[in-house]
Amino acid sequence: MERGSDKHGGRLDDQLKHEVSGMVRSGRSTHAEEWKDPEPSGEDQPDVDRAPGSTLVGAVPEGTSEADIEGRSELAAAIGKEVWPASAQTLLAAARASGATDRVIDQLSRLPADRTFRNTQEVWTALGGGAEQRRF
């Protein structure tokens, strides 16, 4: 015996699933025309949310904090992908060329000048940031 909706058939179920799949995956409306968007909740009704009663926040790997993730991300955006492997001077020049914040420039100026870094994670750990602990 098949369990499912008995209000309408499988074809309509698939069509309805297709109509909302973009919204479910992206968390926002995916329609170009406003009239196609579903109506919001009424004043006396709770808001529709993927996690009612809480705020969804990305997971933070063991060994890091949210501040580590944000700081490393800011650092990576300022440096770019094209400079690796790089010395501290090369990283500082790339950050200045990209218009990095003063915070990133200050961090990069603290790096040891005699070392070559292979990636952003090596730079971040040299600056004292946390690193993910891998599980095998």
Image (cartoon, rainbow, N blue to C red):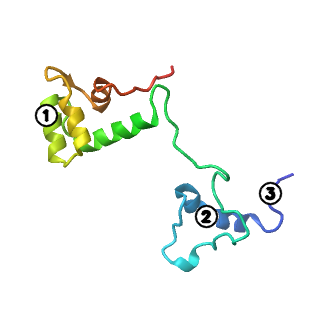
Residue at the spot of label 2: 20
Give the mark nearest the N terminus, 2 or 3.
Answer: 3
Give the CA separation, mark 2 to mark 3: 18 Å
| Residue appearing at x 55%, y 58% in the figure | 27
The residue wearing badge 3 is 4
Q: Secondary structure at mark 2?
A: helix
Residue 26 in view (yes/no): yes
Q: Position of residue 123 (x, y in %)?
A: 27, 28
| Badge 1 element | helix
Residue matched to label 1: 90
Please provide percent x and percent y for residue 36.
57, 76
Q: Amino acid at mark 3?
A: Gly
The answer to which quarter of the image holds residue 10 is bottom right
Which numbered disc covers residue 67? none
Which of discs 2 and 1 lies nearer the camera? The answer is: 1
Measured in 3D between alpha carbons, the distance from the residue under mark 3 to the one under mark 1, in whole angstroms, is: 60 Å
Is residue 81 something one can see in this rendering?
A: no
